[in-house]
Structure formats: structure tokens, C-alpha cells
Amino acid sequence: MSRRNFLKQAGLTTGGLLFQHSVLKAVTPIFAADKINIAVIGCGDRGNGLIHVLHELPELYRVKAICDVLDFRLEKAKKLAPEATPYKDYRKLLEQKGVDAVIISVPLNGHFQISKDALQAGKHIYLEKTMTYNRQEAIELVNLMRNKPKQILQVGHQYRYTPLYYKVKEMIGSGYLGQVTNIDCRWDRNGTWRRPVHDPALERQINWRMYTEYSGGLPAELLSHQIDFVNWAFDTHVDEVQGTGGVDFYKDGRETCDNVQSILRFNKAGMIGSFGATCANRHDGYLFKFRGSKGTVSLLMDEGIYYPEEETRKAMQETVDGVTGATKITWNKDGGTPILTGPLKDGSWYAMKDFHQCVSTLQLPSSNVYTGARTAITVDMINTAITNQTLESWKPAYDLVAP
């Protein structure tokens, strides 16, 4: 391919790497007019955050019910959704005929059973990540969904819907990163992750992320987003997983690791990925890099920079010099150029718009039960490798694809 055609195919013909119009059109199509009556099961920080998102889409959703087993969380949610009927038992909520769909944002160990009950009650589901607590539940949920063709289950991996990450996927698919062989991923914080507990009897329910009975820890709560994006962008799955971790800093009775590191090998793609997180240092914060033979992409949650390799940069400069009449490319001091510019909404906003479309048309979401299972299985493989100090390998039973 000539340099000129290579750059045109890559979309690099104006300042930066912008083509927001095509991206936004791809992820924000025209939707059916009917509002969806939706309920939120699990009104912690995430559930309440999604209530705020629903309020930003009043033409699409009506919050009909809210549910939480903890009184103080239910009271807070009532203030956010005063018109919604409150419940403490999600099974009573699922009996309500006026509820079309449910958001499930409870601790991870409750995802499968509530999803199963919601499917049996005929509800559409927006299920927060990670999809299930372990690989067995992931496989069973896929099998349940195969018998529910008129119901939608969308998993809350919202990176699949944001314009920035959508664009990076297209960049990878176009080939102008070349062959990507190395992925570097971190999500670091410097904080205990502990919530205040006024009643000691509620410690495990409130701080559920710290206990293996409820949680998949850092791989499930943070790294699953980046794992899911890699699966999506490269249409792949992990083949081998190694991992290590421990409670290395916060000696406070927690069970899930506060410091993890895993190495993921993607054999068919010829890639190695390093995925790690710590609760004791925030210098890097969120870090997501793709290193290819033609260039590198460095991603934050809402910002991305493309760093071309020397030969690619020369081709870009020749194009700017008059071959295509392109606008001058803006370079930062490190030799990178922005992937997208301009403000973006939170990824959940784009995801909830897509959920409405999928429910309205019964089309398979981009983040669906099959892709959610692939990521949930990977997270479980990481946690198993850390706990048992084993090399975990992908098995044919995990190859769950849409019919």
C-alpha cells in the first residue's frame, strides 16, 4: 500500500485524527420513540450514578422502581428518583408488569442469580461488569440467554460505546498501528477503597469489594474494562494467563488483593499484555498503551494520543506537505497527535442510549452475554492464577459465540 493510500485509509487526512461525525453516527443512531420503564437493582455508587445518567435521557427512560437491601442506600436513591417505587426484595420488583427492563448493579456474587430471575420474569437486563463472578456462571448465563431471543442482556463495558475507544478500535482494524505485539495496562489508586461502616454487622455488605465471597477484586472491578476492550478491538481472547498478587499494603482484614499483576498471552494475535493495579500508588493512575510496528496509542479514559514510528511519521509529514492537501497535523512535545478533540460524555451515557435501541429493535448489543462471558472468564482465570499460582489456559468450552 502506498503511503498516501495508507494514510487516507487510516483517516489521517486532517489535523489530529478526527472523524467524530462518523463515530458518533455509529454509536448514536435514531431510536424508537417509546420510553422504557426501567428499574435499578442495587443503589450503591454505581446504581445511583446510572440513575443520574437515566435522568439525562428523559426521552428514552422512565425510572419506575429502585431496590436495595440496605435502608440508607434505598433512602438515598429515593431522593434521586422520587417517582420510583422502592423495594428491598428484588423478587417483588421483578413481579411488577410495568417494569420493562432492569439495571443490575449489585455486588458481583449476585449478578448471576438476579440475572437468571430477571430473565425468567421476562425483563430486559443491563448488567454491570464484570458479568459473572466465575466462569461456570458465565457459561450458564450464555446458555440461559440462548433460549431468550426476545430479551436483551447488555453488559456494562461502556468503552465499547465511547467515540474515543470506538475510534481506536477502527485505528487498530485499519492497520496503521501495524502489528500490535505489546499492551500495557494499569489502573492504580492510592487509597484504602474502604467505605465508612456505622454498623459493624454491615461491614461485609458495605465493603464487599474487599471480600472474596462477594468480589473478584481489582481484576473484576477495574481491569475488566481494559480486558474487554482488547477482546473487542482485536476480536480475540486470551490463551494463557499468569498472575501474582497479595494484600501487600492494607493490613486491615481484607481478603481481595490490594496489589495485582498479570501477564496475558494472546497466541493467535501474537500479543502479550501486562495488566496490573495497586491501591498504594496513584502516579500512573489509568494507563492503557498499544504498541505496534507502525505506531503507539496511549489512552486515558477520555483522551488518546497517537505516536507514530519514524517511518509512519515521515509518511504523515509528506502527506501534509501537499500530497493530499491535508491540514497541518498538530504534534505535542513528545511527538504525538490527538486522536479526538472536543468534549465527550461519560461512557455510560452512550451505553444507555445503545441499550434503548437494542431493546427497541431486539438487536444484539455490542457488549452482550457472549462478549461479557469472554471477559468474565478471563477475569476468573486471572484470579485463579493469582490464588493458586498456576498457569491458566483457555479451553474450548469457553468459546461461546452468538448463533
Image (tube, rainbow, N blue to C red):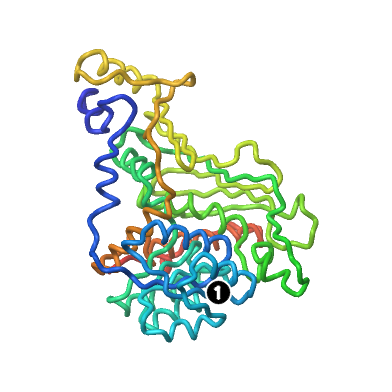
Tell me how many marks there are.
1
Q: Residue furthest top?
A: 321
Q: Position of residue 33 (x, y in %)?
A: 24, 65
Disc 1 residue crowd, few under 14, some 14–19, many 20+, Cα 10 Å: some
Q: Residue at x 57, y 60 (%)?
A: 45
Front one among 70 and 146: 70
Mark 1 = which residue? 110
User: Does 238 appear above or below 402?
Assistant: above
State the residue in front, 334 or 50. Answer: 50
The residue lying at 34 percent from left, 27 percent from top is 16
Above or below residue 191? Residue 255 is below
Q: Give the structural element (helix, strand or loop) at label 1.
A: helix
Horizontal placement of 393 versus 282: left or right?
Answer: left
Instruction: Inspect the image, locate mark 1, and give the three-letter code of the amino acid beneath it.
Output: Gly
- The quarter in which the N terminus is drawn is top left
Q: Residue at x 64, y 36 (%)?
A: 283
Place residue 349 in its image quadrant.
bottom left
Camera-nearest residue between 118 and 70: 70
Q: Is residue 147 left or right of residue 240?
A: left
Instruction: Answer above or below: position of 255 versus 311.
Output: below
User: On the picture, is 363 further left or further right than 186?
Assistant: left
Q: Does residue 100 appear anywhere in the picture?
A: yes
Viewer-side residue, 253 vs 353: 353
**Horizontal and vertical percent position of residue 253:** 78, 62
Q: Split into 4 quadrants, where in the image is the C terminus?
A: bottom left
Tell me if I can see residue 133 in this picture: no
Instruction: Give percent across and percent down for residue 237.
Output: 42, 55
User: Residue 259 at x, y = what percent?
Assistant: 68, 50
